[in-house]
Image: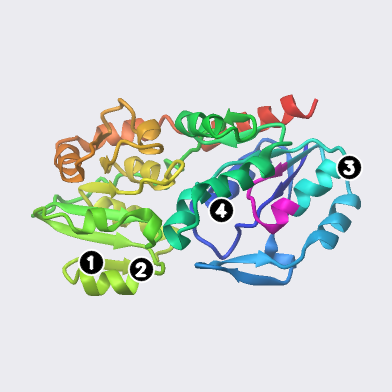
Amino acid sequence: MKILVVSDAWHPQINGVVNTILCTIACLKELGHQVIMLTPEKFKTIPCPTYPEIRLAVFPKKRVQNFLSSREFDAIHIATEGPLGIATRNYAIKNKLKYTTAFHTKFPDYIKARLGLPTFITYSFLRWFHQHSEAVLSPTHSIIKELKKYHIGNPVYWPRGVETEFFRPFPNRKPNKEPVYLFVGRVAIEKNIEAFLSLEIPGRKMVVGGGPLLSKLKLAYPKVIFLGEKNKKDLPEIYNQADVFVFPSLTDTFGLVLLEAMACGLPVAAFPCPGPIDVIGASKAGCLSEDLSEAIKGALKIPRNIARAHALNYSWLEASRLFLERQIQLNN
């Protein structure tokens, strides 16, 4: 198949959306399919308000029309609800082309946390954006339930994977003298990081990632080890240094870092909310509790091989095959 993937999130960003797309593209190509990307790289862009790492295409309508009208695709997938996604959506509807969309990010919660905008406004936008999509590819069953609750499109299941040969336990790992707790992700308000950093627990806390709250949190929590942004190649070693992966977010739709951590043998402590509920579930690879300190205590007791074994259930190749099945089913 010749598949068009449209995404407003792209290089040089480091986030779950970009990682998901990159891994899916690699697997689709491995399966013998052709993937064409439409991203902000070839457009004039401006920084996204409150998230300047994201560059948004400026008035892309005409160039998107020219791009789409000059070639044919067997499937069109719109990954994001930004300017390129909107322009592609509108062109597809006007020209009666079938397409799928994806739900990667809980924008209503993010925007409310950052700007205070009521969620009913952003949910109205999401209903409009996804209403003509053949299917809204959604990462977990909890998210599908939420989308149905808010009458957003036709949500269907599209899971995630992890590169278990890259993210792996180190056989020569030495036990820590005191527990080490790790968070990896964007240092921003929607990640709820202070629910972790403010805990009075024995041991050391480490944070990997950059973002708008980094400077503030460094000052507020001088005992925390802030490592800043790291390349992907550095992450397996960092995961292997820790004893528990702490995931305080209440707004993530999945949390790819959960799989990365567990693939390295790192048990997870998190709140029982969408994302952790689906990824950890009843696997015993992590501990979920409304009291995050209790979740951490529970996770410290989990053998690392149990976390690793659970991560092995998640394959990018199988997730990409399911993505492909959705495209074939919905475009025939």
Q: Quadrant of residue 25?
A: top right
The disc, 2 or 1, on the residue closer to the chain's N-terminal end is 2
Q: Residue at x 73, y 39 (%)?
A: 33
Q: Amino acid at mark 2?
A: Leu
- Most distant residue in the right direction: 70
Q: Say which of 284 and 270 sits in front.
A: 270
Q: Is residue 113 above or below residue 58?
A: above
* Front of the two marks 4 and 2: 2
Binning the other alpha carbons within 10 Å of mark 1 as few (below 14), some (14 to 19) or many (20 upward) gives some
The disc, 4 or 2, on the residue closer to the chain's N-terminal end is 4
How far apart marks 4 and 1 lie (CA) works out to 26 Å
Q: What span is in magenta?
A: 77-86
Q: Secondary structure at mark 4?
A: helix
Q: Say which of 267 and 120 sits in front.
A: 120
How far apart marks 3 and 2 lie (CA) works out to 44 Å
The disc, 4 or 3, on the residue closer to the chain's N-terminal end is 4
Q: Which residue is mark 1?
A: 225
Q: Secondary structure at mark 1?
A: strand
Q: Residue at x 67, y 40 (%)?
A: 130
Q: Secondary structure at mark 2?
A: loop
Q: Amino acid at mark 3?
A: Asn
How far apart marks 2 and 1 lie (CA) works out to 15 Å
Q: Residue 213, which numbered label?
A: 2
The disc, 3 or 2, on the residue closer to the chain's N-terminal end is 3
Q: Is residue 306 above or below residue 34?
A: above
The reply to whether dot 4 and dot 2 touch (C-beta < 8 Å) is: no
Q: Quadrant of residue 11?
A: bottom right
The reply to whether dot 3 and dot 2 touch (C-beta < 8 Å) is: no
Q: Residue 159, which numbered label?
A: none
Q: Which residue is mark 3?
A: 95
Q: Residue 18, which numbered label?
A: 4
Q: Secondary structure at mark 3?
A: loop
